[in-house]
Amino acid sequence: MKSKTIVFTGGGTGGHVYPGLPIIKLLQDKGFRVCWIGSRNGIEKRIIGEWGLEYYPISTGKLRRYFSVQNFTDLFRIFIGFIQSLRLIIKLHPLLVFSKGGFVSVPPVCAAFFLRVPSYTHDSDVIPGLATKINHRMTRNTFLAYDESRKHLGDPKNKIVISGNPVRTEFFENNIPLSEYWEKRLEGHPLLLVLGGSSGAKQINQLIRESLEELCSRYVVVHQMGDDLFNTEIHHKNYYPLPYLREELPALLKKADLAVSRGGAGTLWELAVTETPGILIPLRAGSRGDQILNAEIVSQRGMALVLKDREPTATGLTDLVISLWSNETERKKMAENCRNFVNKRAEDVIVSYLLKEF
C-alpha cells in the first residue's frame, strides 16, 4: 500500500463535522492517517484543532439556490478552492476523500473526481443538502441517515447506502459517571437539559429565560446557550447556563429526564442513542426546512414531541415539559422507541464500505 492517508472534508456547522469523529477514530485504529480540508474561518477549524488532526484551509464560497450578486464572486472563490484542493490532494496522495457535507466539501470532492481518487459522502439530514446533491454525482457511495432521504437523490448506480448517523462512542456507554460538579448540583433533582446546537438558538434561549421561574421550581435546568449567545447576566436557583457542552454532554444526556433541543440531525441521534425523551423546537426561519423534517421523522417514530407552533410561547413550552414529565408511561415508551431506532452503529457500516478500497 503506497499511502495510508485519508482526507476528510466538510464544515459550516457542527452537524457537518462531529459525526465524522467516530469514523475517523475507527480508521485511525486501523492505522490510517486522517487529514481534514475545511474553510479558513469556519467552525470546523476549531473542532478539528481540538481533535489534533492535520487541517488544511481552502478558499470557499456559499452555494445558493437563489439570485444574489455574491453568487458571482463566490464562484471565483469556489474555483480557487478547487485549485487549492487539487494541489492538496496531489501533495497528500490520499487513498480516498470522505465528505461530511457543507459548501466547503464541493471543491475537494471535485478535485478528487478530476484526479480519479475515490470519494464518498455522508449526509445527516432527511433532505440532503445541495453540496451532497452535487457530490453524489461523483462518489463511489453516498451514505444517508434515513431511507426516506433516498428519493431526494437520483441513484442510477445503486450507490446509496442507508447507514444512519455516526454518534461518538461515549454516548453508547451505559454507565457514564457524572463529574462531582454536576453530582452536587443535581442532588437527586430531575434534570432538564436544553441544547441549542453548536451555535446556540436565540429562540430557545428566549423561551427558557421566560420560563425559568416555573421550570426551576421543578427541575435543575442545564442550558447550552451557544458560544456567541452566552449570557452571564441571568441568575436563578437551579439554573446553569453554559456556552457549550463538550466532554460533559454524554453523561448529562444519559442523566437527563427530559431534553429540549432544535431539530439538528446530530442532536436527534444523540437523544436516540441515550434514550432521552425530547421536546423539539425545529428551526423554521432562514432554514431550508431540514430541521422540521428531521423532527417529524423522530416524532412519527414516537421518540420525541414537537412544539409545532410557528410562534412558540414560553407558556406553551412549559406546559408541554410539565405534561411530558408527568406522564412516566409515555416517557418510558419514548425511550423504548429510541432504543429500537438505533439498531446499528453507522460508523461500522461506513468504514466497512471504505475498506473495500483496500
Image (cartoon, rainbow, N blue to C red):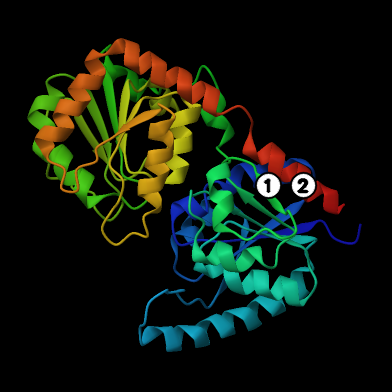
Which residue occupies the foreground of this view, 29 or 141? Answer: 141
Residue 67 visible? The answer is yes
SS type, badge 2: helix
Between discs 2 and 1, the one toward the N terminus: 1
Query: At x 55% / y 60%, what residue is drawn?
Result: 101
In the rendered image, the residue lying farthest to the right is 1
Query: At x 54% / y 30%, what residue is drawn?
Result: 170
Instruction: Write down the residue under mark 2.
Output: 353
Nearer to us of marks 2 and 1 is 1
Q: Which x, y percent locates residue 308?
A: 24, 41
Which residue occupies the foreground of this view, 317 or 84? Answer: 317
Which residue occupies the foreground of this view, 56 or 21? Answer: 21
Report the amino acid beneath label 2: Tyr
Q: Is residue 14 left or right of residue 351?
A: left
Query: At x 9% / y 39%, what residue is drawn?
Result: 210
Crowding at dot 1, Cα within 10 Å, few <14 / some 14-19 / many 20+, comes out as some
Which image quarter: residue 23?
top right
Which image quarter: residue 112?
bottom right
Q: Which x, y percent locates residue 292?
A: 35, 47
Query: At x 34% / y 17%, what residue is drawn?
Result: 331
Task: Give the CA distance from mark 2 to mark 1.
Answer: 9 Å
Which image quarter: residue 193?
top left
Residue 177 visible? The answer is no
Q: Is residue 202 left or right of residue 150?
A: left
Q: Is residue 274 left or right of residue 57?
A: left
Relative to 9, does residue 342 appear above or below in the rendering?
Answer: above
Instruction: Write down the residue under mark 1.
Output: 161
Report the amino acid beneath label 1: Val
**CB atoms at circles 2 and 1 under 8 Å apart?**
yes
Relative to 23, does residue 342 appear above or below in the rendering?
Answer: above
